[in-house]
């Protein structure tokens, strides 16, 4: 431990901040998705951090239901894109069409113009179509025929991905994966949660009962509050060191990018906000690192899987000294 880490300043305790909006959203989503509290909390964190989520899992575990439940809870618009090999970039972003009445070209927005965009089975789309989402995810805008159109806020892409060894899939390129703040696996529910799901859907669809639990103004205020969380330089340096540790691992060809470091800090700030703090803790960074960093890594072994990247991040966490904030 260095001298500067031993001498970390004392952070003044502040009263708990209001968490009502986040709690209400989480409770509403849990009424639809049973037994996945941690995963729901992580997606909510990404939403507050204005990031994007990649859900990789086998079909039928509730990936699309999760995204729709969040859209219903925040009262936002939601559009679903079913990715197929013949999907075109304009099918996502929109296109200019001829207005017969005026004889002029008019922009017809595509499904990406929504608060939450569900890109189902994104790795079944061609690389060219996958690339159509890059500008949307990185800059919150779409440019068609030289004209830039802003996307609504909040804006979250929830992309689902089948395991890459399934038929008809294209591996996401590094540049595309880098745009996602978090990669999650939902996994199968436990027996109790699966039984509760079966019973709840015997006579009704729980998603139909979800109503907005916050206003656009309230949720925008929560996003602003998450961005405003104070981050001491020592905690920011800790996040940088974690990312750099992945680049120095012998099994890694490409480590976490600077964009991944920024995403890690933003996500950690959102976690601090949800926990009722207006200051960033090293524990926030450590808790999100296993979700934010692994999918940014490119291993030397082409047969390496996500678990191998997670092991690298776990090693980085274990070997990097966190500052002690008192």
Image (spheres, rainbow, N blue to C red):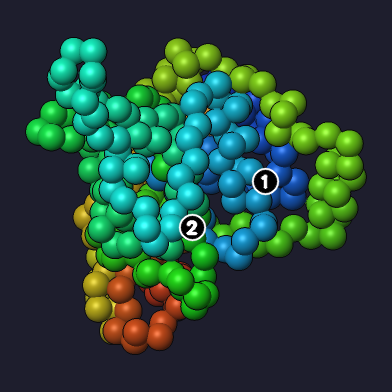
Disc 2 from disc 1: Cα separation: 23 Å
Which residue does the image show at 61% across and 20% down from the upper left? 212
Classify the position of the N terminus by image quarter: bottom left
Circle 2 sits in a helix, a strand or a loop, which is it? loop
Residue under label 2? 121
Kindly indicate the quadrant of the structure image that contains residue 139.
top left
- The mark total stands at 2
Give me the residue at 37% from left, 25% from top: 153
Q: Position of residue 298 (x, y in %)?
A: 30, 73
Q: Quadrant of the C terminus?
A: top left
Q: Which residue is mark 1?
A: 37
- Chain-order first, disc 2 or disc 1: 1
Relative to residue 49, is residue 251 depicted above or below? Answer: below
Q: Which mark is residue 9?
A: none
| Up/down of 224 relative to 81, above or below | above
Residue under the image location 67 percent in, 58 percent down: 60
| Above-or-below relation of 248 to 204 | below
Most extreme residue toward the left is 146
* Image spot of residue 265 (x, y percent): 34, 45
């Amino acid at each position: 431990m260095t001298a500067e880490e031993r001498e970390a300043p004392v952070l003044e305790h502040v009263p708990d901040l209001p968490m009502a909006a986040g709690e209400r959203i989480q409770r509403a989503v849990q009424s639809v998705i049973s037994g996945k509290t941690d995963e729901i909390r992580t997606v909510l964190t990404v939403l507050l951090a204005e990031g994007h989520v990649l859900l990789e899992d086998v079909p039928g575990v509730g990936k699309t239901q999760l995204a729709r439940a969040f859209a219903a809870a925040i009262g936002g618009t939601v559009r679903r894109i079913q990715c197929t090999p013949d999907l075109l970039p304009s099918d996502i972003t929109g296109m200019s069409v001829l207005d017969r009445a005026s004889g002029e070209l008019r922009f017809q927005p595509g499904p990406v113009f929504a608060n939450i965009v569900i890109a189902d089975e994104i790795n079944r789309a061609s690389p060219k179509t996958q690339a159509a989402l890059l500008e949307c995810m990185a800059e919150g805008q779409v440019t068609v025929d030289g004209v830039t159109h802003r996307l609504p806020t909040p804006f979250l892409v929830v992309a689902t991905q089948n395991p890459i060894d399934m038929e008809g899939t294209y591996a996401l390129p590094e540049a595309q994966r880098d745009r996602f703040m978090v990669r999650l696996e939902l996994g199968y529910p436990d027996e109790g949660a699966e039984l509760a799901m079966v019973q709840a859907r015997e006579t009704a669809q729980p998603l139909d009962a979800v109503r907005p639990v916050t206003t656009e103004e309230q949720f925008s205020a929560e996003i602003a509050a998450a961005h405003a969380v104070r981050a001491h330089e020592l905690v920011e340096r800790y996040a940088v060191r974690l990312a750099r540790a992945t680049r120095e691992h012998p099994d890694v060809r490409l480590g976490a990018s600077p964009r991944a470091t920024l995403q890690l800090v933003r996500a950690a700030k959102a976690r601090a906000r949800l926990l009722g703090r207006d200051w960033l803790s090293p524990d926030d960074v450590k808790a999100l690192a296993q979700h934010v960093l692994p999918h940014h890594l490119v291993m030397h072994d082409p047969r390496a899987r996500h678990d191998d990247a997670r092991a690298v991040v776990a090693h980085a966490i274990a070997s990097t000294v966190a500052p002690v904030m008192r």
